[in-house]
């Protein structure tokens, strides 16, 4: 008796009827950056952008000054959080990376081929250096801005203090653009969005989360503090 197509379909085993693979399978991720660090990063970036765009003209001078003070306050928060916060947010990790710079440079000078150089470590060193410079330059940038706003330069005559403030503002912009260019280059070289962890806090890969507590409440408090200060100064 000849089997019908219906009978053949009914006699197939589960092994013979494989389900097609879907591209929507979720990849495992790990939490590597907590919410307060990410909130600080974006508030800091937006404060500088706003301060730079409002640098010219008297009409927006109060907003410019307020954003500059906000950067100084955010820097104070980051330093305290780096000292008192969790290990993942510690500023010591940046210093440890920079401390390895002489060893890496010595290894580069002694290498016999470009392929033998640990370029990933060099990229991490450049990223850490950019972050440290961005944090450190806030001090002369805001101090010169505070002095300009309160006309400290009038004691010595001329607009020299305002020119100093403008110099640090342009230098800061240069470092910001270099930082963004480095992130873009690393994203292309590693074929991964290197800015994504500062948005979502996560990176692809299996394993335990580096961040045990996300501390969303602290990120919300930081945001409310910045918004309240801005409203108090401007309104």
Image: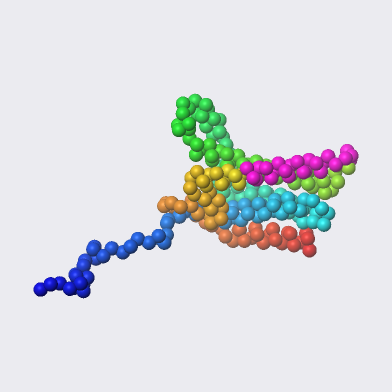
Residue 103 visible in the snapshot: no
Q: Residue furthest left?
A: 1
The magenta span reads: 155-178
Q: Nearer the viewer, residue 113 or 32?
A: 113
Above or below: residue 82 compared with residue 234: above
Where is 204 relative to 96, above or below? below
Please state if 132 lies on the left or on the right of 160 as rendered: left
* Horizontal relation, residue 177 to residue 124: left or right: right
Which quarter of the rendering shows the C terminus? bottom right
Name the chief secondary structure element in magenta: helix
Residue 232 is covered by the magenta coloring: no
The picture places residue 202, in percent across and down from the top left corner, at 50, 54
**Image position, residue 187 (x, y; %):** 52, 47
Q: Kindly identify the residue that appears in the image at 45 percent across and 31 percent down.
A: 116
Give the residue at x 50% y 29%: 107
At horizontal 41% and vertical 61% (from top left) the residue drawn is: 24
Q: Position of residue 171 (x, y in %)?
A: 71, 41
- Does any portion of residue 198 appear in the rendered image? yes
Rendered residue at 24%/62% (across/down): 15
Image quadrant occupied by the N terminus: bottom left
Q: How is the image coloured?
A: rainbow
Numbered circles on residues, count: 0
Residue 82 placement, left or right of 69: left
Q: Nearer the viewer, residue 67 or 55?
A: 55
Where is residue 178? Give x, y as percent.
Answer: 62, 42
Q: Is residue 171 magenta?
A: yes
Depth order, front residue of 15/39: 15
Instruction: Give the camera-side residue of 109 and 7.
Output: 7
197 over 235 or under it: above or below = above
């Amino acid at each position: 008796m000849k089997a019908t197509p219906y009978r053949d379909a009914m006699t197939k085993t589960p092994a013979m009827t494989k389900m097609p693979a879907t591209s929507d399978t979720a990849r495992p991720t790990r939490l590597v950056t907590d919410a307060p660090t990410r909130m600080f990063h974006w508030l800091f970036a937006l404060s500088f952008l706003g301060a730079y765009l409002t640098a010219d003209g008297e009409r927006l001078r109060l907003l410019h000054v307020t954003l500059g003070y906000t950067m100084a306050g955010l820097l104070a928060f980051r330093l305290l959080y780096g000292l008192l916060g969790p290990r993942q947010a510690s500023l010591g990790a940046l210093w440890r990376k920079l401390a390895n710079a002489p060893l890496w440079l010595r290894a580069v000078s002694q290498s016999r081929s470009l392929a033998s150089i640990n370029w990933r470590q060099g990229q991490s060193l450049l990223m850490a250096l950019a972050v440290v410079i961005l944090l450190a330059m806030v001090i002369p940038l805001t101090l010169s801005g505070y002095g300009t706003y309160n006309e400290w330069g009038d004691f010595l005559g001329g607009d020299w203090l305002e020119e100093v403030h403008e110099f640090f503002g342009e230098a800061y912009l240069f470092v910001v653009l270099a930082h963004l260019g480095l992130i873009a280059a690393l994203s292309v070289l590693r074929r991964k969005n290197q800015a994504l962890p500062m948005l979502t806090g996560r990176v692809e890969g299996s394993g335990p989360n580096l961040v045990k507590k996300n501390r969303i409440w602290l990120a919300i408090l930081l945001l409310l503090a910045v918004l309240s200060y801005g409203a108090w100064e401007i309104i």
